[in-house]
Image: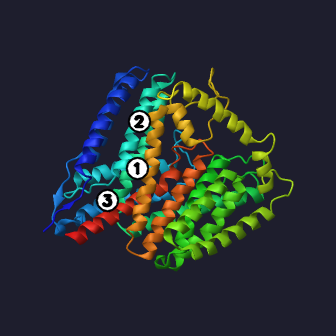
C-alpha cells in the first residue's frame, strides 16, 4: 500500500532550513547591534529556528488507513480553530484595539497559533501544515533583503519588526490556517465570517453617512467614511477584497439558503461601504477582482448578474450623496486626477524613489520608512507596494514580494484546476479574485502587511492543502 506524505517535500525543508539559517544570522546580528541588545537577538534566532523546524522537519509517512487525525487530535485542535474563525469574524473591525494598539482579531489569531502549537505537542498524531515552496522562497528573499537594508536604517530594530510582521503573515499565519481548516466546510465558514465582518463595516459606514461620527475611534474625512476601519482607504481596500468573496458565497448552490442570503446581503452592504470610502483605487481593484473570478470559474453569466447587483447598489449609494460633496465618485475622480490632484503628487514621489533605487538597487533605506522623520528623502509615502518595498528593502525584498505574489496566484489557479465540484471551483476562484483585488489595490497604496489582504491567500492555501490530501488518499 502506498504511503501518504503528510509534510512538505524534503527539498522544501532544506530550502527552509538553509534560508532561515542565513536570515537568523543576519537578523540576530542587526538586532544585537541596536538598543534591543543580545537578549532580543537570541529571541529572534530561537524563533526563526522554531519556524525552520516546523517548515523543514523530515516528512513523516503513514499508511492510508492512518491518514485521518485521531479523535483526540480533532478535539485538541477545536479550540484554536474556533479562535482562528473568530479572528476572521473580527478581521474588519480595525478600531477594536484594547491593548498596545493591537486589534482583537490579532489577539485571537495569536491565541490560535499558541493553542495550535500546544495541540501539536499534546496530540498523539500531530497534524502538519502545508506551505507552497514559492511562499517560503519569497519570504526568505524578502527577509534577507530587509535585514541587509536595515544596516542603512537609523531605526534597524523597527525595520526588523516590520519584516517580522510581514513574514508572520505570509508564512506562519498561512501555515496555521492549513492546519486548522481541514475541510471544505471549514474554509467556506471562514469566508462567511469574513464577509460578515466587512458587512458590519459597511453598515458602520452607512451609519456614519446618515448620523455622523457615531463609530468610536473613527473620524470621517471630507465626506469619506471609515466604517470600522481607522482610515478611509482601509475601509476601501478591505471592502474591495471581501466583495469578490461575498459574490462567490452568494453564487454557491451547496452553501444553503442562509449562507447564500448572507453572501447576497453582504455584497450589497460591502459595495455601499466601498463607495462611501471614496477610494477610487479600491473600486478599480474590485472590478478587476470580480472579472478575474468570473474568468477562472467560467461562470461569466452568474458573475455578470452579480455585477449588475453591485452596480445598482453603487448607483443607489452614490445617488444619496450630496452632489456638491467631494466624496462623490465624480468629486473623487477630480481630486485624484485633476490638475492639482493626488495622482500627480504621487507620481512625483515615484520619480524620486526611482532615482534612489537607480543609485542603490541592492540595498534599501530600511523597512518602516517614515516621510515625517527628520532628513527623510521623500515628502510622502510611496503609494505602490512593490516600488515601496524595493525602495525600503532593496532588490531582494522586492523580488521576494514578487515571488510571494506569484506563488499566491499559482496556488489559487491550481485550486481552481483541481476542484472536485463546481462549487469548490467557485470557492477557489473567488478567493483568487480576492487576492487579485488586493494586488491591484496595492499598486496605488503602500499596502504591504494589512492582514485583510492576505485572508484570501490563507484560505486558498488551506483549500489547496485539502485537495492535496484528498488526492493522496485517492492514490493510495
Residue under the image location 49 percent in, 29 percent down: 158
Mark 2 or mark 3, which has the lower sequence index?
A: 3
Up-down relation of residue 419 to residue 147 (above or below) = below
Q: Which colour scheme is used?
A: rainbow
- Where on the picture, by quarter, is residue 43? top left
- Percent position (x, y) of residue 346? 69, 38
Question: 407 left or right of 330?
Answer: left
Camera-near label (2 vs 3) is 2
Spot the residue most to the left: 1
Under circle 1, the secondary element is helix
Residue of label 3: 77
Q: How far apart are marks 2 and 1 (CA)?
A: 16 Å
Q: Is residue 138 visible?
A: yes
Up-down relation of residue 201 to residue 221 (above or below) = below
Camera-near label (2 vs 1) is 2
Callout 2: 10 Å neighbours few (<14), some, many (20+)?
many
Q: How far apart are marks 2 and 3 (CA)?
A: 30 Å
- Percent position (x, y) of residue 177? 38, 56
Residue of label 1: 173
Callout 1: 10 Å neighbours few (<14), some, many (20+)?
many
**Which of 26 and 12 lies nearest the eye of the viewer?**
12
**Which of 40 and 341 lies nearest the eye of the viewer?**
341
- Percent position (x, y) of residue 364? 51, 28
Circle on res. 143: 2
Q: Can residue 112 be seen in this view?
A: no
Q: Do the residues labelled 2 and 3 touch (CB within 8 Å)?
A: no
Residue under the image location 27 percent in, 37 percent down: 18
Up-down relation of residue 298 to residue 85 (above or below) = below
Under circle 2, the secondary element is helix
Amino acid at each position: 500500500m502506498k504511503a501518504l506524505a503528510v509534510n512538505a517535500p524534503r527539498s522544501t525543508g532544506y530550502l527552509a532550513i538553509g534560508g532561515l539559517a542565513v536570515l537568523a544570522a543576519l537578523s540576530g546580528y542587526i538586532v544585537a547591534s541596536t538598543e534591543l541588545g543580545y537578549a532580543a537577538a537570541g529571541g529572534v534566532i530561537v524563533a526563526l529556528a522554531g519556524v525552520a523546524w516546523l517548515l523543514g522537519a523530515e516528512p513523516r509517512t503513514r499508511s492510508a488507513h492512518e491518514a485521518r487525525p485521531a479523535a483526540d487530535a480533532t478535539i485538541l485542535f477545536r479550540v484554536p480553530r474556533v479562535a482562528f474563525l473568530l479572528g476572521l469574524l473580527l478581521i474588519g473591525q480595525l478600531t477594536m484595539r484594547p491593548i498596545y494598539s493591537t486589534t482583537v482579531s490579532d489577539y485571537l489569531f495569536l491565541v490560535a497559533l499558541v493553542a495550535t502549537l500546544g495541540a501539536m505537542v499534546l496530540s498523539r498524531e500531530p497534524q502538519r501544515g502545508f506551505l507552497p515552496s514559492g511562499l517560503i522562497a519569497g519570504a526568505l528573499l524578502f527577509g534577507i533583503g530587509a535585514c541587509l537594508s536595515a544596516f542603512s536604517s537609523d531605526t534597524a530594530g523597527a525595520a526588523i519588526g516590520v519584516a517580522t510582521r510581514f513574514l508572520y503573515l505570509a508564512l506562519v499565519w498561512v501555515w496555521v490556517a492549513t492546519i486548522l481548516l481541514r475541510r471544505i466546510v471549514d474554509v467556506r465558514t471562514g469566508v462567511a465570517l469574513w464577509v460578515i465582518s466587512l458587512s458590519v463595516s459597511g453598515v458602520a459606514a452607512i451609519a456614519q453617512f446618515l448620523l455622523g461620527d457615531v463609530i468610536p475611534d473613527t473620524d470621517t474625512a471630507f465626506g469619506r467614511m471609515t466604517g470600522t476601519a481607522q482610515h478611509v482607504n482601509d475601509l476601501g481596500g478591505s471592502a474591495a477584497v471581501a466583495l469578490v468573496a461575498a459574490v462567490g458565497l452568494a453564487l454557491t448552490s451547496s452553501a444553503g439558503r442562509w449562507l447564500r442570503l448572507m453572501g447576497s446581503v453582504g455584497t450589497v452592504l460591502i459595495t455601499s461601504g466601498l463607495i462611501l470610502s471614496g477610494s477610487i483605487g479600491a473600486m478599480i481593484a474590485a472590478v478587476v477582482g470580480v472579472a478575474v473570478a468570473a474568468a477562472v470559474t467560467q461562470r461569466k453569466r452568474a458573475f455578470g448578474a452579480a455585477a449588475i447587483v453591485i452596480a445598482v447598489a453603487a448607483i443607489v449609494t452614490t445617488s444619496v450623496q450630496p452632489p456638491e460633496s467631494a466624496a462623490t465618485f465624480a468629486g473623487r475622480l477630480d481630486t485624484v486626477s485633476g490638475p492639482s490632484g493626488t495622482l500627480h503628487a504621487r507620481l512625483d514621489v515615484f520619480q524620486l524613489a526611482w532615482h534612489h533605487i537607480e543609485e542603490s538597487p541592492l540595498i534599501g533605506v530600511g523597512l518602516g520608512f517614515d516621510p515625517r522623520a527628520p532628513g527623510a528623502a521623500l515628502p510622502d509615502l510611496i503609494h505602490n507596494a512593490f516600488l515601496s518595498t524595493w525602495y525600503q528593502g532593496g532588490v531582494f525584498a522586492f523580488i521576494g514580494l514578487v515571488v510571494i505574489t506569484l506563488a499566491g496566484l499559482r496556488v489559487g489557479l491550481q485550486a481552481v484546476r483541481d476542484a472536485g465540484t463546481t462549487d469548490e471551483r467557485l470557492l477557489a476562484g473567488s478567493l483568487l479574485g480576492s487576492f487579485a483585488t488586493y494586488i491591484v489595490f496595492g499598486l496605488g497604496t503602500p499596502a504591504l502587511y494589512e492582514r485583510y489582504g492576505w485572508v484570501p491567500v490563507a484560505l486558498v492555501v488551506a483549500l489547496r492543502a485539502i485537495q492535496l490530501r484528498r488526492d493522496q488518499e485517492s492514490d493510495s
